Amino acid sequence: MQYVLEDVEPLYVFLRFADQDKVPTLGEVLVQYQNTKQTYAANLSQKNPTRFEHIMEIIDRRMSTVMLGTYVQGACVLNPMVNYTMGTTDSLMTNLRKYLERMCDTNTAAAALQEAVFFKQKRGDFAGELARRMATDHATSPASWWSMFGNDTPTLQRLAMKLLSQCASSSGCERNWSTFAFIHTKLRNRLGHKKLH
């Protein structure tokens, strides 16, 4: 029983995080996933390295298929908490470039990538202590942070706010539709639009 809890609990915490209605955004999923990997490493890597490697191989394989073709990694790059606490690697910047190429035209993507250098190097609006503090305080959402500190980089600011406002999961919509299905049934199918609201 103890082994089952050690194997499943960190993954369960991650899935519960991603399944919340409003809190998790795309920019926070990868950060939470890294926390999950660190929890597994702390719990299992010393006690049972073979089991640790087996579990991580399964989870990494599944996460790579989930993230394939999504904007999760691009959102992670634009997450201010990631930039101020861990920094952005070259591979994450490559993912940002791919995201921008898919999301917008060439001129807009070029302008946003040029502005991304200011964000990565923490220059201009991003250089102040207030910007760093609010990026790492967990009380300011990433999209709100960009609305306050992205004025020097208007193209990147607009794209970051759009991307970082996206929910990580459609669970909230599914719950809403389930509730609606209880209200608008075959017996109550003549309810007006105002009454439904």
Image (spheres, rainbow, N blue to C red):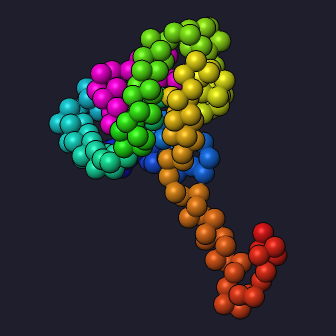
View extreme (right): residue: 195
Query: Is residue 92 one of those drawn in magenta?
Result: yes
Q: Position of residue 3 (x, y in %)?
A: 32, 44
Magenta part, dominant SS: helix
Which one is in front, 115 or 29?
A: 115
Which one is in front, 67 or 107?
A: 107
Can the viewer see residue 57 in this picture?
Answer: yes
View extreme (left): residue: 50
Total marks in image: 0
Q: Residue at x 28, y 44 (%)?
A: 64
Query: Is residue 83 one of those drawn in magenta?
Result: yes
Can the viewer see residue 116 in this picture?
Answer: no
Q: Is residue 191 left or right of residue 73?
A: right
Q: Quadrant of the C terminus?
A: bottom right
Which quadrant of the figure has residue 97?
top left
Vertical position of residue 101 compared to residue 87: above or below: below
Q: Position of residue 118 (x, y in %)?
A: 47, 15
Q: Residue at x 24, y 46 (%)?
A: 61
* Magenta residues (range): 80-98
Q: Position of residue 151 (x, y in %)?
A: 62, 21
Vertical position of residue 90 compared to residue 142: above or below: above
Q: Position of residue 138 (x, y in %)?
A: 61, 27
Q: Residue at x 57, y 49 (%)?
A: 20
Q: Is residue 92 left or right of residue 191?
A: left
Q: Residue at x 75, y 88 (%)?
A: 190
Which one is in front, 15 or 130?
A: 130
Which one is in front, 39 or 3?
A: 39
Vertical position of residue 156 compared to residue 181: above or below: above
